[in-house]
Image (tube, helix red, strand yellow):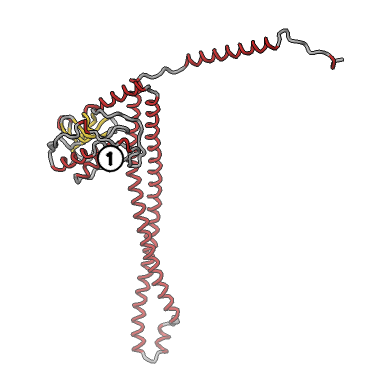
Amino acid sequence: MAAHRKSKQSPLGGQAIRTAATLALASAATATLFEGSGHADPRPTTAQVKAKVDRLYEEAEVATERYNGAKEKADEARAAFDRLRDEATRRTQRLNTARDALGAMATAQYRSGGLDPAVQLALTSNPDQYLERAALAEKAGDRQAAAVTAVRRELAAIRQLRGESAGKLTALRGHEAELRRQKAAVVGKLAEARTLLARLTEEERAQYEAAAAARDGSGASTRADGASGTGAASDSATVRADRSSGGERGPVTAPNARAAEAISFARAQLGKPYVWGATGPSAYDCSGLTQAAWRAAGVALPRTTYTQINAGQRVSRSQLAPGDLIFFYSGISHVGLYIGGGQMIHAPRPGAPVRIAPIDEMPFAGATRVG
């Protein structure tokens, strides 16, 4: 009987059920839409984007200088490790030579039979000849003792070199790990800046570029594409002559020939792109440019901003002379080369080529006179 019962029919027809379901889904979607829009972050203004991008560029430059410092230490550790490895190789060669000589002496003694000297004297028919040979044997013994001493000395030196090499290798790996961390920090900051700038409309981007160009003292456009940290320009299109900012002015009156040479070199780099970690000749970061400029004048500067500031005599802002290094921000993360008249040559940031700019565009942190 149960098998023949009819199922209970719904009081609503199939069409009515489908309609109700559709309305319910639509209501849920509408509620979700309003809920989501009610919590959406407001779109940042151009001024807000500019402020955040500028901050990201400053943080990227701090990371760049840390990268430069880590790279310098890694290069020094690698050179020291290579020197120790080469010395260990030379010592090993000398050890092998001493071992061969010692082996030859031992072989000769074995072939001579190694008889007791008194027995050899009793058996010889020519005592004078025996005494002569005994003297030679004594000298040979001295040579053998010297060879043993040489072997022991080389073994001790090699053990010491291997210990020092292991320490240098550990230091090298630590510096390389720091290099990777700072490189990731730079790349991350620059990528975030690019993402922010991409959110601007074309008109807003034009406003941002105009403001950035005004701040840099140049009419060149600002781009957020950046740098590889390899020392070479990532985009040849960024190499542009930026002479409109004063690059064609006459020679600057420098306090000495070296300062004049450094400024002349820096002027010749105008228009070359900023690439983080670069030291020329096709691209530079800020400290790479000042280091290269003074190297051309015969003065060796350290690699980073926070070491360059201690590379000479500190001077106040009122005492600035052409050729002085000017540093900016509390972290000493940016440097330019003063050329007089309140102007400097510097490598500003990714997308902004080497240019002349006013020194008051960034917070002054100190100045150093070198050469």
- Does residue 76 appear left or right of residue 2 in this picture? left
Q: Give the image quarter of residue 185.
A: top left
| Mark 1 residue element | helix
- Quarter of the figure that contains the N terminus: top right
Instruction: Count the numbered circles shown.
Output: 1
Nearest the eye: 274 or 90: 274
What residue appears at the point 17 percent right and 42 percent down from the top-left corner? 261
Residue wearing tag 1? 288
What residue appears at the point 34 percent right and 89 percent down from the top-left corner? 128
Q: Position of residue 188 (x, y in %)?
A: 40, 33
Image height check: is 221 above or below 164? Answer: above
Q: Position of residue 144 (x, y in %)?
A: 37, 73
- Does residue 335 appear left or right of residue 92 in this picture? left
- Quarter of the figure that contains the C terminus: top left
Name the kind of residue labelled 1 in the image.
Gly
Q: Position of residue 54 (x, y in %)?
A: 32, 27
Nearest the eye: 81 or 25: 25
